[in-house]
Image: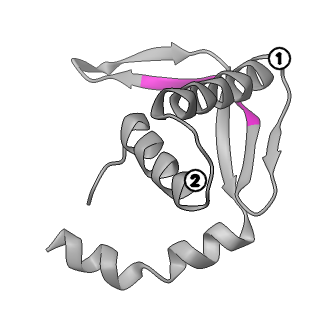
């Protein structure tokens, strides 16, 4: 399966917006993408959830403290402290589009 980088995403967005008549550079699009990522990160770090309709929601979750095992010494237990984690919950439109790609995903694994 292909991996899309921020740079490739900026190129694609620039091409699509140029086709729609907008004059915008890849550098400007890259700045917009990075600003979006920074704003989402800052909002989550402040304890807020971020919701983008039709795309999905970034939600904060608390992972409780638990006991784990040290892989180098499986008999020794290690305390893993409680922590905050981010969960992405996809929106309905994203779920539907991704669900329709199952055949493509299976073919790429071969």
Start and end of the magenta stretch? Answer: 60-68
Q: Position of residue 4 (x, y in %)?
A: 36, 47
Q: Is residue 83 in view from this perspective?
A: yes
Foreground residue among 81 and 62? 62
Q: Mark 2 against mark 1, which lies toward the viewer?
A: 2
**Colouring used for the render:** one colour
Q: Is residue 107 above or below residue 58?
A: below
Question: Which residue sits at x=53%, y=14%?
Answer: 79
Residue underneath mark 2: 17
Q: Is residue 66 magenta?
A: yes
Q: Furthest-left residue in view? A: 110
* Mark 1 crowd level (few <14, some 14–19, many ≥20, 10 Å Cα): few
* Mark 2 crowd level (few <14, some 14–19, many ≥20, 10 Å Cα): some
Q: Which comes before the other along the chain, label 2 or label 1?
A: 2
Main secondary structure along the magenta-highlighted residues: strand
The alpha-carbon separation of the residues under discs 2 and 1 comes to: 32 Å
Q: Is residue 84 above or below residue 2?
A: above
Q: Is residue 37 magenta?
A: no
Q: Quadrant of residue 105?
A: bottom left
Quadrant containing the N terminus is bottom left
Q: Secondary structure at mark 2?
A: helix
Q: Position of residue 52 (x, y in %)?
A: 78, 50
Foreground residue among 69 and 98? 98
Residue underneath mark 1: 46
Q: Quadrant of residue 45?
A: top right
Is residue 99 toward the left or the right of residue 2 in the image?
Answer: right
Question: Which residue sits at x=61%, y=15%?
Answer: 81
Q: Position of residue 66 (x, y in %)?
A: 59, 26
């Amino acid at each position: 399966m292909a991996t899309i980088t921020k740079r490739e995403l900026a190129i694609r967005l620039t091409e699509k917006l140029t086709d729609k008549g907008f004059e915008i550079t890849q550098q400007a699009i890259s700045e917009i993408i990075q600003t979006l990522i920074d704003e989402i990160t800052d909002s989550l770090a402040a304890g807020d959830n971020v919701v983008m309709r039709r795309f999905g929601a970034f939600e904060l979750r608390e992972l409780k403290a638990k006991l784990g095992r040290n892989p180098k010494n499986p008999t020794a237990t290690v305390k893993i402290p409680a922590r905050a984690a981010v969960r992405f919950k996809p929106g309905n439109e994203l779920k539907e589009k991704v669900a329709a790609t199952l055949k493509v995903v299976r073919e790429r694994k071969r």
